[in-house]
Amino acid sequence: MKYNNIIQGIFLKRVNRFIAHVLVDHTEHIVHVKNTGRCRELLIAGALVILEPSQNPERKTAFSLIAVYKGDRLINMDSQVPNYVVFEALQAGGIPELGVPEKIKKEVTYGNSRFDIYFESAQQQHFIEVKGVTLEEKRIVLFPDAPTVRGTKHVYEMIKAVEAGYGGTIFFLIQMQNVDYFRPNVKMDKDFAKALSLAKAKGVILLAYDSVVHEDEIVLGVRVPILL
C-alpha cells in the first residue's frame, strides 16, 4: 500500500486515543492518530513521526499520524493498513501457505463476527482475521498491547468456522522488520493467549509475517516464527 505526499514531524504529546500534537516545520499541529492502541513505547515526546495530509477539507485535523521511528526502525501506525497489505498479497498469490484464491472479499460476516477477508479456491472456503502488531521488545513482537475482548471473540468465532468445515487463519501482520519471533502477550491478556492456543489445537492456521515499511509504502515481508 502506498501513501501520497507524506511529511515528517516531531511527536509532542497524545491527548487521547484519536488525537495528538505534532511539531511540523516549527508549528504545532493537532493530528489524527490512526491507531487506537496504547502504543506507549512508540508515541513518546521527541519521536520522529510520519504524517499523511488529510484528503477531506472538512476534517478538523489536517494530518494523520501513520508511522513512527523507534530508533532507526520505522513502525507503521495505521491500523487500517494490515488488512489491505494481506489482501493485496493474497490476491497476488504472495502467501504460499494459503495458495491462490479464485474469489476474494473483504469484511465478510460469519456468526457474530465480521472477519477481515474471505476467499475461495478449488480446495476450500476460507476466513482470515488480520491483527496488526506494533509492540516490540528486544526483537520479540507481542500482541495485544492492551486487553482485547473483541480480539478474543474473533478467535473463538474462527474456531467455530473451522469446526463447521471452513478454513480459518489468524494472521498477525507485524508492522516492522528485523524481528526474531512473535508470541501472544500473556501478561497483557491471558484470555487471548489461551484462545490462540486452543485455536491452533482445533486446526486454525496461525501465521505471522513482518512488513517492509517505508515512509510512503508498506508491503508484506517474510514469515516470522510463532511461539505460543
Image (spheres, rainbow, N blue to C red):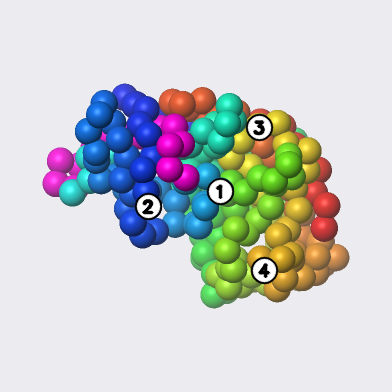
Which of 37/108 is in front?
A: 37
In which quadrant of the rendered view does residue 90 lie?
top right
Q: Residues within 10 Å of mark 1 (few under 14, many from 20)?
A: few
- Give the mark toward the camera: 2 or 3: 2
Q: Which residue is mark 2?
A: 14
How many marks can you see? Answer: 4
Q: Is residue 54 magenta?
A: yes
Residue 190 point in image, percent of width and height: 72, 71
Labelled pair 1, 2 in contact (Cβ < 8 Å): no
Disc 4 is placed on an element classified as: loop
Q: Which residue is mark 4?
A: 189
- Give the mark toward the camera: 1 or 3: 1
| Residue at the image position 47 percent from the left and 46 percent from the top | 43
Image-based side of 209 in relation to 132, left or right? right
Most prominent secondary structure in the magenta stretch?
Answer: loop
What distance separates the C-alpha of mark 4 from that of mark 1?
18 Å
Q: Closer to the N terminus: mark 4 or mark 2?
A: 2
In which quadrant of the rendered view does residue 51 lie?
top left
Q: Amino acid at mark 2?
A: Arg
Q: Is residue 201 magenta?
A: no
Which numbered tag is attached to residue 177?
3
